[in-house]
Amino acid sequence: MTIADQITAKLESTPSFRERRFRESYLLEMVLEKNKIIDMPVFLTQLMDVIKDYMSFERVWRDVLQDEDNVHLRGEDWSHGKILDQNYQINTLGRKVGYNQDVKVVR
């Protein structure tokens, strides 16, 4: 079962997981279950704080790099992101590049 399958199943079985305010706790629970880490309340509270901070930092990091005034701060792979993604799809996932582009959206 892929991560997407696990998350979909959890979303279907647990309506509160659909709420953004509970996202971190459920995702943390899933990660801990996957890694077979024992539930320790104090540890979990601290870990939740770390996860919230990480998500905030990561969101702001993306926002800063997407700002056109900060082009000079982007890494070498920024402009080659599509090529890197395609190579990853081919070499790691075994997918044909653009495999999903032949699907038309009906509006």
Image (spheres, rainbow, N blue to C red):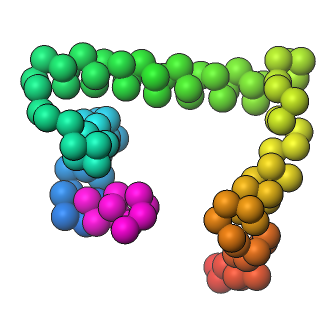
Left or right of 85 on screen, residue 19: left
Quarter of the image that includes the N terminus:
bottom left
Residue at left 85%, top 52%? 83
Number of dots carrying numbers? 0
* Residue nearest the observer in this picture, 75 or 92: 92
Question: Where on the picture, by quarter, is residue 71?
Answer: top right
Q: Position of residue 41 (x, y in %)?
A: 10, 24
Q: Which quadrant of the view contains residue 6?
A: bottom left
* Residue that appears at 34% across and 58% down: 7
Q: Is residue 53 above or below residue 8?
A: above
Left or right: where does residue 92 sit relative to residue 3?
right
Q: Main secondary structure of the magenta part?
A: helix
Relative height, residue 49 to residue 10 (above, below): above
Q: Position of residue 91 (x, y in %)?
A: 74, 62
Residue 29 in sight in this render: no
The spot of residue 42 in percent (x, y) is 13, 17
- 106 inside magenta stretch: no
Q: In this view of the protein, which residue sits in the foreground, 29 or 19?
A: 29
Queried whether the magenta region covers residue 8, the answer comes back as yes
- Which region is colored magenta? 1-10
Direction from residue 66 to residue 30 in the image, left or right: left
Quarter of the rendering occupied by the C terminus: bottom right
